[in-house]
Image (tube, rainbow, N blue to C red):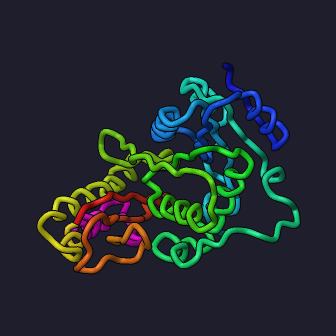
Amino acid sequence: MDLIVAADRAGLVKARDALGPGRIALVPTMGALHEGHRSLIRLAREHADHVVVSVFVNPLQFGPGEDFSRYPRTFDADLRTCEEEGVGVVFAPSADDMYLPDRQVEVSAGGMGGVVEGAFRPGHFDGVLTVVLKLFNLVRPDLAVFGQKDAQQLALIRRMVADLDVPVSVVGAPTVREPDGLALSSRNRYLSEADRRTALALSRALRAGAARAGTAGPAGILDAARAVLEEAARFDPPLLLDYLILADPATFGPVGDDHRGEAILAVAAKVGTTRLIDNMVLTL
């Protein structure tokens, strides 16, 4: 079956009907697809008969001064990627088609939406959950695949699905990295060669912390990661740290010394004009 491109809601209804019977997986994206997105699509194909990829740069999740206007838009290349990966439908609506002009209601991310990444990007997760819920309602998938790289986002989507009884299974996909360790991101294309050398400190810090997980408590893990980041703060260009946290995956609050089981070592920093996030799941 050839790839179907649906540019609006009416086109999506027709495209979904054309898929025929079987399980449908949704892979929500903002486009600028890379190998990490390919891994999400491949995982979706393992779990479903048909894959729908949404390509929509969601204005609700960008705050004032963020990179909405310059966020990379590579739609023709994205379509080629989807064709190569056997996607059935690409849903690429406009903002006017997604949101009513007098829109009043949106999803609140609650307390977890205001900590860690949410503390630096107020309202960001409200915008994420609103568009994801709308995509769930429009596409009506059986399951949806999201990357672990956006760990807090993944946790909040799972919470929304549980709290609002949304009949969609949420599947998390492992973070895909470049050979040098940098987590794949559409924003990596903003990095100069010098920026990239500095940015590698994020993954090095996570590995340094992870190496202490079997022998140290939360303070020791954070100290090991922080030492790498503090060194990178003296690079040219410097790494400007927003946060480093060892978080409970259920709440994204900091873990205590008595925490056992999974924890997420998460970091966010700015290099040049580019803000990057990364994380690693540890077992304490």
Could you say which quadrant of the image residue 203 lies in?
A: bottom left
Q: Work out whether 34 lies above or below 122.
A: above
Which residue is at 28% across, 80% downward?
Answer: 256
Q: Residue at x 72, y 41 (%)?
A: 92
Q: Nearer the viewer, residue 65 or 272?
A: 65
Q: Is residue 82 left or right of residue 251?
A: right
Picture quarter with the C terminus = bottom left
Q: Nearer the viewer, residue 109 or 231?
A: 109
Q: Answer above or below: position of 179 versus 183.
A: above
Provide residue 60's location: percent of width, then percent of height. 69, 63
The answer to whether residue 283 of the structure is visible from this angle is yes
Tell me: 215 left or right of 62: left
Residue at 59%, 40% in the rendered image: 25
Instruction: Please check the rendered image and state whether residue 147 is part of the magenta-colored stretch, yes or no.
Output: no
Seen as rendered, the residue at the extreme left is: 215
Confirm whether residue 61 shows in the render.
no
Please identify the quarter of the rendering in which residue 260 is found: bottom left
Span colored in magenta:
225-243
Q: Is residue 48 found left or right of 62 in the rendered image?
A: left
**Residue 196, percent from left and from top:** 38, 49
Q: Quadrant of residue 247?
A: bottom left
Query: Image height check: is 128 above or below 82?
Result: below
> Where's residue 116, x and y in %?
45, 73
Residue placed farthest to the top in the image?
1
Image: 95 above or below 110: above
Residue 200 is situated, as x and y percent measured from the top left of the image, at: 32, 52
The quarter of the rendered structure image containing the N terminus is: top right
